[in-house]
Amino acid sequence: MSNPDQLHRYLFTHHAVRGELVSLSETYQQIIAGHDYPAEVRHLLGEMLVATSLLTATLKFDGDITVQLQGDGPLKLAVINGNNRQEMRGVARLQGEIAADSSLKQMIGNGYMVITITPSEGERYQGIVGLEGETLAECLENYFMQSEQLPTRIFIRTGESAGQPAAGGMLLQVLPAQETDAEEFNNLVQLTTTIKAEELFTLPANEVLYRLYHQEEVTLYEPQDVCFRCTCSRERCGDALLTLPDEEVLEMLEEDGQIDMHCDYCGSHYIFDAMDMVSLRSGSAGSTENNVH
């Protein structure tokens, strides 16, 4: 049986090291549902989902985070949006055939990872990382070394649980402004490396931690639920249409009789006809009954 989609934080009593553990099945399934992604792209989106959840938990902020991969390879773009409430959505865009068993670099080509953090209050921050690691986890570990100078290790697993797509992962990080012995940290890393996908997907967090660190004292904190949530709305689509020149809107209406705004993330359609556009332009939000899933 799969775990509920939850993020768990934990702390080692005798080491200046914190950890996180996340297990995701339903959120992952909702992100890839309705898209005919190749298996390699599905796995990458699962890895990115896990990574974004783990990354968000290391940041003390209210706001949004976006982890984006882009390049000139057959996978043009892969992106996961999340926030401090662990509400996630994601999408991928292809521009060519993805060969079976393609690596990260083979899919993205010459590209990079962009991590954008947009706090509710304060400055927006963007970090750009070259795809120098062989895996997404390695690339993120490089990001932490560059941006925060904190030794960090990330472990990501994707696969299936009870016949359904599932993803999970763990993160270990030396606590800021505290000294920790490199050998102690490496020992914890070696223990965590042994985590199996099935354990992450099916076992309660306390059992996973006991299996990995039964000789350590570990404090496990209350979990945080993770879920799929799309931020699209009819109002947002209407606002976007209002930014277009009148001629362009008229052209779209003459061509199809209506404008169909489609959300790549969740598959929703928002339909606007000529009367809706008149209402929008006169300051009304228009009918809210024309959105279909």
Image (cartoon, helix red, strand yellow):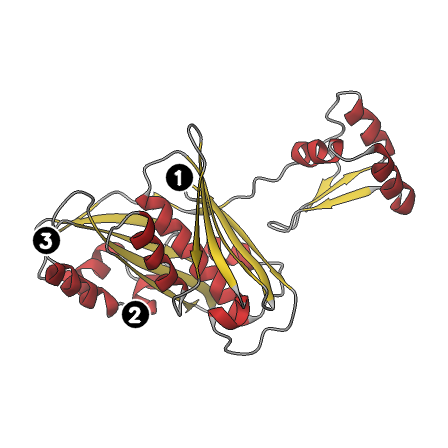
Residue 148 in the image: above or below residue 208: above
Q: Can residue 51 be spotted in the picture?
A: yes
Residue plotted at (11% across, 49% down): 179
- Residue type, label 3: Glu
Residue 230 in the image: above or below residue 212: above
Residue plotted at (63% across, 65% down): 36
Q: Is residue 170 left or right of residue 237?
A: left
Cα distance between the residues tagged 3 and 2:
21 Å
| Residue that carries the numbered disc 3 in the rendered image | 217
Label 2 crowd bin: few (<14), some (14–19), many (20+), radius 10 Å: some
Cα distance between the residues tagged 3 and 1:
28 Å
Cα distance between the residues tagged 2 and 1:
27 Å
Q: Can residue 1 be spotted in the picture?
A: no
State the residue lying farthest toward the bottom: 100
Label 1 crowd bin: few (<14), some (14–19), many (20+), radius 10 Å: some
- Residue type, label 2: Lys
- Residue type, label 1: Asn
Relative image position of residue 278 (x, y in whole percent): 84, 26
Residue 84: give its label: 1
User: Which of marks 2 and 3 precedes in the sequence?
Assistant: 2
Q: Are marks 3 and 1 in contact (CB under 8 Å)?
A: no
Q: Are marks 2 and 1 in contact (CB under 8 Å)?
A: no
Secondary element under disc 1, as helix, strand or loop, is: loop
Q: Nearer the viewer, residue 211 or 246?
A: 246
Relative image position of residue 40 (x, y in whole percent): 52, 70
User: Which of marks 1 and 2 precedes in the sequence?
Assistant: 1
| Residue that carries the numbered disc 2 in the rendered image | 196
